[in-house]
Image (spheres, rainbow, N blue to C red):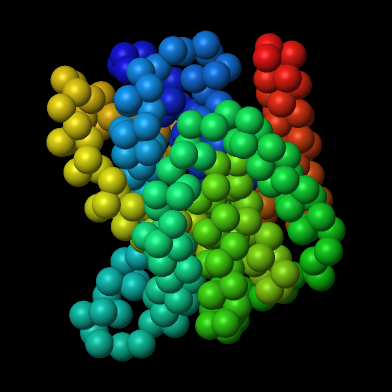
Amino acid sequence: MTLFQALIFAIVQGITELFPISSVGHGVLTPYVFHWNLNQAFLNEHFLPFLVMLHLGTALALLIFFWREWLTIIRSLFARSQNRLLLLIIVGSIPAGLIGVLLEKPLTHLFTNVTSAAFFLIINGLLLFFGERLRSKGKKKINDLTYGQALVIGLFQSLALIPGFSREGASMTAGFWAGLKHEEAARFSMLLATPVIAGAGLLEVPKLAKSGIHGLFQISLIGGLFAGLFAYLSVTILIRWFKKNEIDAMKPFAYYCWIVGTVVLITRLLTR
């Protein structure tokens, strides 16, 4: 992989991670769209760790954007006082952590499957469209959630382990059903993403350092920084979008998923 390719991946990752349109799905589709003939050994062994490195850049952007919430959480730890937000984040992070560890190998082959990513991108669009339509008007804030609701939201977040499903889209949809406002659902979804991404980084990033591919770790690190920059811009735009649009906020993203997924599937069929 060249530095130019890594930067394109990073820009795509940074933009799509926090919009509910599946960053991993776009990571799978990017080489196909640009007709990059990436080494198959790289795709099989190192593509997932590379994507996780880009996700770490996203996690850094989230830490910076939500620094007040995380500072409050850290202070509560030293004060030995119970912090409800921290407990909700811990509970919500459990499903993705467990499923990711238990099903890592069975899911790995999906990270190079273009047809699968396009198909699940269409399903993701259906989840966004009908998930929002079936919700009641949300009035809750994050701290109004029960621990059971946080667990369910975390379970939906686990769908992002399948390329094509969006972490933010799935968890925000579950947040709508739990009665959260659009902005609150987005905030909780992004707060949940940080520890999950950090955990994945601890497992996958060391594989890059041991890959034996010259310069791969350095290129991935630069890509992670670029992904973080674009992710910060994305989260700023998304939070403003949900503040202004409490009705049908997910529709544009659903349409996008349907269009991209359908176009890719059609081109795959025509080129066989």
Residue 186 visible in the current orientation: no
Task: Provide residue 43's location: percent of width, then percent of height.
Answer: 38, 28
Residue displayed at 70% across by 31% down: 261
Residue displayed at 68% across by 12% down: 271
The answer to whether residue 112 is left or right of residue 119 is left
Q: Quadrant of the N terminus?
A: top left
Depth check, front residue: 229 or 135: 135
Residue displayed at 31% across by 33% down: 46
Task: Provide residue 70's location: percent of width, then percent of height.
Answer: 35, 65
Depth check, front residue: 185 or 67: 185
Task: Provide residue 119's location: percent of width, then percent of height.
Answer: 69, 37
Depth check, front residue: 237 or 203: 203
Label count reads 0
- Residue 230: which quarter of the image? top left
The answer to whether residue 98 is left or right of residue 165 is left
Q: Is residue 149 above or below residue 250?
A: below
Residue displayed at 48% across by 31% down: 112
The answer to whether residue 91 is left or right of residue 198 is right
Q: Is residue 186 above or below residue 250?
A: below
Q: Quadrant of the C terminus?
A: top right
Task: Provide residue 183's location: percent of width, then percent of height.
Answer: 63, 59
The answer to whether residue 219 is left or right of residue 193 is left
Residue 169 visible in the current orientation: yes
Depth check, front residue: 255 or 229: 255
Q: Residue furthest right?
A: 133
